[in-house]
Amino acid sequence: MTATMPSPVVLEGRSVRLEPLTLDHVPELFAAGGGDDEVWRWMPAATPRTEAEMGAVAGSLIDDPGAVPLAVVHDERAIGWSTYLDCPGFDRSIEIGWTWYGRAYWRSAVNTECKILLIDHAIDKLGFNRVQLKTDNMNVRSQAAIQRIGGTHEGTLRRHRPRPDGTWRDTVYFSILDDEWPPNRARLQARLDLPAASTSQ
């Protein structure tokens, strides 16, 4: 496991706040994306059909020592989550993944602002030199979103793992290096016209 996995943290932006995921978020999360097959189509868990199922998925992530899940809060309601993940075999890499948002927030500024907060914290505050992002090879929407924030395609692992439906997933890998992030951040910041973010623990 990466020696310096992040501690739970609160990251404040203009329109979103990232805070440690807890089971208290589950009712709002279920309202935002529970039962929506399109939201969960490419996730590593089956679509939660009840609050209890959403709680079980959230709980397994909360209990995972290789994950630091953060609830995405917009207008004081949890609308999804994103997660720092361990990168076995890489000394100074961290992964951002296991991310979903309610469909009402797709094609909004939410994902871009979340990624700025998460990558800034990983590189500027914690000193990681590589941020990894990966997705299903069939999830072209996610691949396009990763490329928009500056992700460089590294390759594809074939038959990487089974999907919840039992079919095999090929996984597409991207990364952003520390020296690549400043110009990408400036481009995204200009697009969003965001003020400087703050961090608290």
Image (cartoon, rainbow, N blue to C red):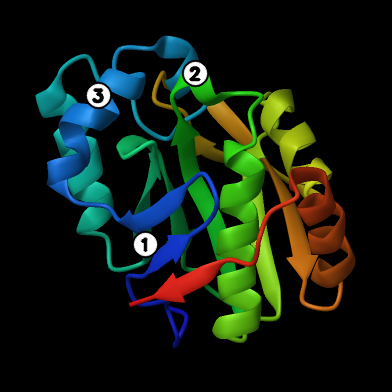
Residue type at mark 1? Ala
The image's mark for residue 30 is 3
Quadrant where the N terminus lies?
A: bottom left
Local packing at callout 3 (Cα closer than 10 Å; few below 14, some 14-19, many 20+) is: many
Q: Secondary structure at mark 1?
A: strand
**Image quarter of residue 28:** top left
Secondary structure of the residue carrying tag 2 is helix
Task: Give the number of the mark in front: 1 or 2.
Answer: 2
Image point (36%, 67%), residue name: 66
Residue sitting at x 34%, y 22%: 32
Quickly name the residue at label 1.
Answer: 67
> Upstream in the sequence, badge 3 or badge 2?
3
Q: Against 91, is 121 above or below?
A: above
Residue corresponding to mark 2 = 103
Report the label total.
3
Q: Compared with residue 97, is residue 39 higher up or lower down, i.e. above or below?
A: above
Question: Is residue 152 visible to us here?
Answer: no
Give the residue type at disc 2.
Arg
Q: Is residue 114 left or right of residue 86?
A: right
Query: Is the Cβ of the residue at disc 1 closer than 8 Å to that at disc 2?
Result: no
